[in-house]
Image (cartoon, rainbow, N blue to C red):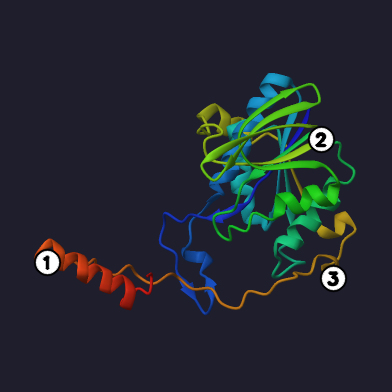
Amino acid sequence: MDIYVLLKRTFDTEEKIVVSDGRIEDESAEYIINPYDEYSVEEAIKQRDELGGEVTIVTVGDEEAEKQLRTGLAMGADKAVLINTEDDLEDGDQYSTAKILQIYFEDKEADLILGGNVAIDEASGQVGPRLAEALGINYVTTITALEIDGDTAKIDKDVEGDVEKIETSLPLLVTCQQGLNEPRYPSLPGIMKAKKKPLEELEIDDLDLDEDDVEAKTETIEVFLPPEKEAGRVLEGEIDDQVKELISLLKDDAKLL
């Protein structure tokens, strides 16, 4: 079983984020594995341990992403691949990433590809489906359970508070949702082993691509932080008066009624 994980390096939304001149200041940001991708890594390891095979984690980004790849290796993945776009692609988007991955996977015989449901930085949820469409393989998004028997996969898909039961065939791409599993923490032996596991670095030239082939199809106009949350308002007086005031606020101030 050849299993691949699509991994993204994202900033940690639990830490303070500074935006200057329409860009996030990298120097002040803390970076982690995209949390939804952690479910993908965990599920890939579980499926490998049950079915046999090998887990390879792949990311598109700059050399700083090696840290997150090593974390994935410490969790238990077998190999890692960094497709370094630092010198060739200044501003990519979901199209750029999916195109690069498409070319990378064209000569691979992947049985199962896992990715996060969304990335917490942009939350578009596009890369997985775009890649599956480009490769011409089946895909299911937002999964919360996965059982593979031979070439058949039985899947639970999260659909707005309910569950859809799906049966499909390999090769298959899935995107992983919270509830699928509980990602493990890298152990000390795992961290030590990760230092010796193979980590291949490629550039888009190695994939016979140039910058024009992966040029972004979208443009980011502005990046800004949400407004600070305003203090709540406590309504006073008799209940009937409070209800009337609340309705007035919702109608006239918030424009919700």
Asked if residue 112 is positioned above or below residue 66 in the image, the reply reads: above
Instruction: Name the quadrant of the N terminus.
Output: top right
Q: Nearer the viewer, mark 3 or mark 1?
A: 1
Under tag 2, what secondary structure? loop
Q: Nearer the viewer, mark 3 or mark 2?
A: 2
Cβ atoms under marks 2 and 1 closer than 8 Å: no
Question: Within 10 angstroms of label 2, few (less than 14), some, or many (20 or more) residues?
Answer: many
Label 3 to label 2: alpha-carbon separation: 30 Å
| Dot placed on the residue nearer the N-terminal end, 3 or 1 | 3
Q: Quadrant of residue 49?
A: top right
Please tell me the numbered disc located at residue 171: 2
Asked if residue 130 is positioned above or below residue 217 in the image, the reply reads: above
Question: Within 10 angstroms of label 3, few (less than 14), some, or many (20 or more) residues?
Answer: few
Q: Amino acid at mark 1?
A: Glu
Q: Position of residue 155 (x, y in %)?
A: 67, 31
Residue at the spot x=13%, y=61% of the render? 239
Residue receiving disc 3: 212
Label 2 to label 1: alpha-carbon separation: 62 Å
Q: Amino acid at mark 2?
A: Pro
Label 3 to label 1: alpha-carbon separation: 62 Å
Of residues 161 and 245, which is closer to you in this image? 245
Question: Within 10 angstroms of label 1, few (less than 14), some, or many (20 or more) residues?
Answer: few
Residue receiving disc 1: 236
Left or right: residue 98 versus residue 206 is left
Under tag 3, what secondary structure? helix
